[in-house]
Image (spheres, grey):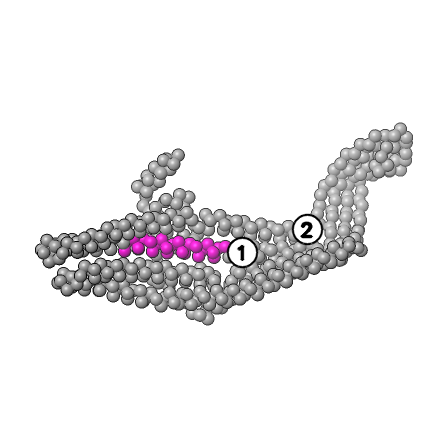
Amino acid sequence: MTAAIATGWAQQAGTQGPVVITLDEAIHRAQANEPAFAASAAESKAAALDRSIAKAAMLPSVLYHNQILYTQANGEQNQAGQGVGSQPSPRFIANNAVREYASQGVVNETVGLAQMAEIKRTDAAAAFAQAQLEVARRGLVETVVILYYGSEAADRKLDVARRALAEADAFTDLTQKRETAREAAHADVIKAQLEQQQRQRDVSDATIAAERAKLELGVLLFPDPRTPYTLQIPSGMAEVPARAAVETAAANNNPDLRSAFAALKQSDAEVLAARAAYLPDLGLNFTYGIDAPQFAVNGPDGVRNLGYSASITLDIPVWDWLSTQHKVKQSEIRRDAVRVALTAAQRRLIANLEEAYKEVTTAHDQLASLDQSVQTATESLRLTKLRYTGGDATVLEVVDAQNSLTLAENAREDGMVRYETALANLQTLTGTL
């Protein structure tokens, strides 16, 4: 089976070109494939249905009740319930007749503060679940951004490793030619070959790293993570947003704060529901139908079996051994803890926003310096090779210049990933991504 999958994947790769994936497409695919996000979305939908269920509890319930009851007779006769003639007496005094038929429509309604408190609680719970869904979405977006730009950086580092290998190959060839011309010692060739071998190993490691990064992202994008794809990176680099706009957006559109506020409202509703046990509940009942010894609209001698009954009940709590008071206290204790969590979320938002903005500005400012370092290292390598060709530099200086260029190029790729990741983190805090 594994071989068949591999064969099918190879055929697909051979007949179709790689799928082009933009960042928006990657986020969209990840939302459809990531199980934690799917669980958050399901919880949000279920919480919305809980709210509908709580509201339905405030409305009258209607059911159609049907029952046939037979009771063993005791051999005596009693007056019929309809006032006509007599009928066998049942042995069970709670039953009305030996045969009793019930076919009734029943309407029930219970009015109390607890039902209204439950609506408030489910409203807050739905808002909390929606905020948690947004938190999960932004966390997933941040993960996708890291993997997306990390995969691109891994590909670029592979290009850097290949360039460094080509540079090492060329330098090895140069040292060999100089040795042949008796312009350099054999030690230079050995040093160049050692550098060449190291660069070959670097290419192998960079290849594995690039493939690993693609597979990690592919897990979120495709049913088969080995599906070939390419990333379409935006041509221009996004600028750092203004500080005032960032603070305004973060204050108005932060799911962690919305989640904390919704949790507080939910706790308030739970306190209200606990206090509702102090108050009476009003119950209303209306029944219309048949409850008679005959399953018929009319009984013997034209007695009408079809009729209705209505009742009103008022249950007043008197004494429950302080359990209601303790439940109220419990809910108030939990509400106090939720208030602490709300203030902590507000403080954490301020700190996260400050950290994220400083990180993105620092990473942005360093990009120009990293580019300059690459240019400087490139020029340094060129000049050092010219000096080596002229006999003014040693092989160690050339190797050092090669290593400096490779390090500078890799640092530039890491700096780009750092900036894109920091920018995505800032955008998720403000809700713009």
**Quadrant (top left, top right, bottom left, bottom right) of the C terminus:** bottom left
Taking the view exactly as shown, the residue that stands out farthest to the left is 181
x, y (%) of residue 15? 31, 41
Per the rendering, the mark at residue 132 is 1
Q: Residue at x 36, y 66 (%)?
A: 364
Under mark 2, the amino acid is Ala
Is 249 situated above or below 51?
below
Magenta region includes residue 138 = yes
Q: Nearer the viewer, residue 315 or 89?
A: 315
Q: Which numbered disc, 2 or 1, marks the residue that appears first in the sequence?
A: 2
Q: Which quarter of the figure has residue 238?
A: bottom left
x, y (%) of residue 305? 81, 38
Confirm whether residue 99 shows in the render.
Answer: yes
Per the rendering, the mark at residue 57 is 2
Q: Which quarter of the figure has residue 111?
A: bottom right
x, y (%) of residue 5? 37, 37
Q: Residues within 10 Å of mark 2 (few under 14, many from 20)?
A: some
Which dot, 2 or 1, sits closer to the camera? Answer: 1
Under mark 1, the amino acid is Gln
Numbered range of the magenta stretch: 136-160
Q: Nearer the viewer, residue 247 or 367?
A: 367
